[in-house]
Image (cartoon, rainbow, N blue to C red):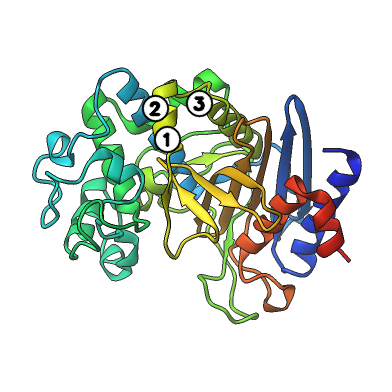
Amino acid sequence: MNHSDHAAVQRLLDRAVAQGCLPGILAEVRDGDQRWFGTAGVADTATARERSAQDRFRIGSITKTFVATVMLQLVAEGTLSLDDPVDKWLPDLVHGHDGGKVTCRQLLNHTSGIFNYTEDRDALNRHETHTPELLVRIATSHPVTFPPGTGWGYSNTNYVLAGLITERATGRALAEEIDQRISRPLGLAGTYLPHGSDPSIRGPHSRHYTKMFRPEPDAPVFDVTELDPSLFWAAGGMISTAADLNRFFGALLGGQVVAAAQQRDMFSTVPTHEWLPDAAYGLGVSSLRLPCGATVWGMGGALFGSWSYSYGTRDGEHMVTTNVNGDWVDDDSGWDDPIGVFTDLLQAKFSPDDFLTLHLP
């Protein structure tokens, strides 16, 4: 990506803050060994401090890619199989849902039919802290969405179960497995899964702001930088940086993290429904077909006050990671939500000429 292309991305970052009324946005572009970092807006509205390349942020569902990667490494080692039923590792936990038929593969590609616990906010709000087992109990108090393997439905419960299976199979905490198998070998110094209910973000970080998904332009803004990550855990509790995510996905897409047979499993996709536009889902990863016709691979994550995208070419040589530290956009911006901003950023990265012609004034 040349300097003029970087200018196109920077202008879009500026527009996201000016027209989208986001507090701040950052992006790191990686092409082979070359890096470019851009930002607009602020990391902290009280001090007007700018966002930096070192800033850590909550990555939401991008956590799922790390969990799937660990599980696929365990498959390669012969510790477990993608065809193992949930009941083999977690007997009697999936009450009311046939854990004898739901497989590890169906957990990872969201074809299990198990209810998504985050849709039951009333039940979640009745508890101050949330163990993984509690999250599963909340989910299984609801009927199945569809019989296992007969449909697709995004469910955070799937990855809570995958995290529990990983811990049962290894005898170690999921956070330790991610650290030992991924973060340390790849040098991801800013990437970790918080332990328990630790509400802090270690190291330099942006503040995270939310309007609690209220649509009014004058809705109050809340600082939710410190929150209890146990509510999300293996489904969305991790913290990282833009550079770390580019390094991780570059290595993953490039075949350096998961063995070849398991990589074929990981990137074998199923159609999605009512999720991201023009997307397909594999095992913890997704593909997106951009308006320009290019297809990119990676994952997105949305959490209170922090939305992120990390996508690149299938060989991992070209990556872009973006994060906003607010979870809204202004109605007059032309975007419905931060995902619209991210799509345009990917278009700017992977089809800059078309983007300059069609989108930038």
Within the image, what quadrant is residue 337 found in? Answer: bottom right
The image position of residue 234, as x and y in percent, is: 37, 43
Q: Who's the residue at 53% across and 21% down the image?
A: 256
Q: Who's the residue at 39% across and 33% down the image?
A: 265
Q: Residue furthest front?
A: 293
Q: Left or right? Give the position of 303 relative to 138.
A: right
Given contact means CB atoms under 8 Å apart, are the residues at marks 2 and 1 in contact? yes
- Looking at the image, can residue 54 be seen? yes
Q: Who's the residue at 25% across and 66% down the image?
A: 123
Q: Quadrant of the C terminus?
A: bottom right
SS state under label 3: helix
- Mark 2 highlights which residue? 262
The disc labelled 3 sits on which kind of residue? Ser
SS state under label 1: helix
- Mark 3 highlights which residue? 183
Within the image, what quadrant is residue 319 found in? Answer: top right
Q: Quadrant of the N terminus?
A: top right
SS state under label 2: helix
The image position of residue 164, as x and y in percent, is: 25, 38
Given contact means CB atoms under 8 Å apart, are the residues at marks 1 and 3 in contact? no
The disc labelled 1 sits on which kind of residue? Met
- Mark 1 highlights which residue? 266
The disc labelled 2 sits on which kind of residue? Gln
Mark 3, residues whose alpha carbon is within 10 Å: few (<14), some, or many (≥20)? many
Q: Left or right? Give the position of 300 relative to 73.
A: right
Q: Left or right? Give the position of 140 relative to 55.
A: left
